[in-house]
Image: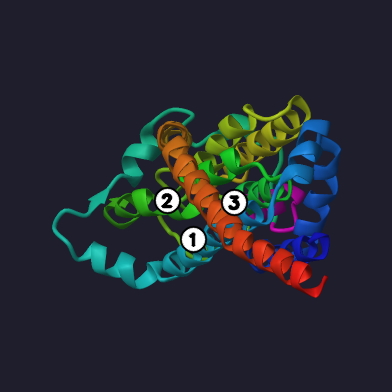
Amino acid sequence: MMMQRFWFVLFIALLVSYEIGFNSLFIILLFLPLTVTERDMERIRCANRHQWLTNTLILLLIVGMGIISTLIFQANEPLHAWAQKQPFYFDANAFMASIPYNDGSFFWFREPTVHDPLYDVYVIGFIAVYLVYAVYAYITVNRQTLVRLLFVNWFVHGMIALPFYLFFNVHEVWSIMGHNWGHVPYSVKNCFPSLHTSVAFSCLLLALRENRRFATLWSIYSVLIIFTTLYLRIHWVFDVLGGLVLGWALYLVAERLAPFIIARLEAREMLRASRAVTRAIPIHGESKAIQRINR
């Protein structure tokens, strides 16, 4: 059983590394054992085969949603070109630039480059903040968190924000304010609301439900991701505010809907376990009858 769990975790880790890079995944996962408590260990020891199997399917769904959303946003160029031809396309660049301090210049303590360590936090953190969290929840058999992450991953945020990216023209700060430091968006040109902010903030709110050590680590990580969006001259302050609202809203949705999903999963597992016991009883009785005959 332990070997099966090990191969499951290894397989999931490889899938996650497809999104965020194996080195980054390895470094982040090194810190996570420091946050595992005795309560987590007890939950791991008590988990049965059905629980591990169901949790594996949930985690695969989360990872799959992340991969699908990446592919969708990589197709942003043709979608954006189509949206520009629509009569309801709205250009808000001049409006954003006219708002004092909306460019986040109060965080510009130095000129960034693509080799800046905080740039790695920005690029990797977008996906890692919920995918690595999901792996952690899976390893510690924390289904409460694992199911909630279904509602706050990049796919859900991206689907809600997609109309804004298509029809609400807000380009990144550096391109509007003339701070070309070498950053080239690989997919999304528009930036309202900030999905870096919304995903990180919703994960931060989820982390506050965990033990103190994990909550501290993940809160620092989440805040650092949000900070980089302004420091790197990528998102406007209004983008960040919009991301905070979106992240908070989806966190509330997760809190409301997750208990119903968890209850249904547990009911199915109990039914499966009872059927397994029922099937085993006749076999047990038959073996006793054979033993009596042999005597």
Question: In the depicted view, which residue is nearer to us: 6 or 199?
Answer: 6
Q: Which three-letter amino acid code belongs to the residue tagged 3?
A: Phe
Name the residue carrying label 1: 65
Q: Nearer the viewer, mark 1 or mark 3?
A: 1
Q: Are marks 1 and 2 in contact (CB under 8 Å)?
A: yes
Q: Which mark is residue 156?
A: 2
N-terminal label among 1 and 3: 1
Residue at x 74%, y 61% (from the top left corner): 9
Residue 126's disc is 3
**Label 2 SS:** helix
Give me the disc on residue 225.
Answer: none
First-in-chain label (1 vs 2): 1
Magenta stretch holds residue 256: no
Q: Nearer the viewer, residue 29 or 104?
A: 29
Q: Position of residue 67 (x, y in %)?
A: 53, 66
For label 3, the crowd category at 10 Å Cα-Cα, with few meaning under 14, some 14 to 19 and many 20 or more, is: many
Q: Earlier in the sequence, mark 3 or mark 2?
A: 3
Question: At which x and y percent is residue 239?
Answer: 44, 39
Q: CA distance from mark 3 to mark 2?
A: 13 Å
Assess disc 1: are there few (<14), some (14-19) or many (≥20) residues with their C-alpha within 10 Å of its C-alpha.
Answer: some
Q: Name the residue type under label 2.
A: Val
Task: Inspect this view and state whether residue 290 appears.
Answer: yes
Q: How many marks?
A: 3
Q: Is residue 173 above or below residue 205?
A: below
The span shown in magenta is 114-127
